[in-house]
Image (cartoon, grey):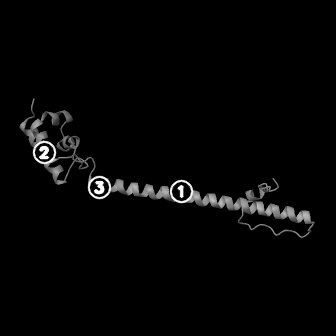
Amino acid sequence: MPVSAATATKIREAMARLLAGEPLHTNGALTKENLAREAQVSHATIHRAEDILVEWDAKVARPVLRSPGEVQRDETIAKLRRQLRESKAEVTQLQGKFDALAAVTANLYHENFALKRKLGTSRRLASLPPSLPASALELDPVRTDG
């Protein structure tokens, strides 16, 4: 059962607005669902208007699922996500280097302390700088004697 003349007119006007990029009721994507919304008719009514859908398919060779604004937004989001991944990888790498340096420093401090005790040196060792975390002092020295 085809649609009434008034409904066909509403659908054609909606199609013209969408194709001109001037939608009133949708985001502007060239889809049949948006055509129905723009015309303010049901999805079933659009599919009963077969002759109008043939025109739609001829004018919209490949349906665009996203408006230009959505495409630009998605590209920006993808770029920012890539930059965030790269930054996180760099931070992880630098944190690993920092942790390794802290461990080496703590081990050297303990080895130095042990050597001075072995030599019987009574001079007090200089304290570590305040920026070194206290957890670095709790590390066991690395043994190199096998």
Distance from disc 3 to disc 1, alpha carbons, whole Å, reads: 30 Å
**Mark linked to residue 80:** none
**Residue at point 18%, 49% (across, down):** 18
Viewed as shown, does residue 45 lie left or right of 146? Answer: left
**Mark linked to residue 89:** 1
Q: Is residue 11 above or below residue 140?
A: above
The percent coordinates of residue 58 (x first, y second) are 13, 45
Distance from disc 1 to disc 2, alpha carbons, whole Å, reads: 48 Å
The percent coordinates of residue 64 (x first, y second) are 24, 48
Q: Is residue 117 above or below residue 16?
A: below
Mark 3 is on which residue type?
Gly
Q: Which residue is mark 2?
A: 58
Label 3 crowd (10 A; few <14 / some 14-19 / many >=20): few
Quadrant hosting residue 69: bottom left
Q: Which residue is mark 3?
A: 69
The percent coordinates of residue 61 (x first, y second) are 17, 46
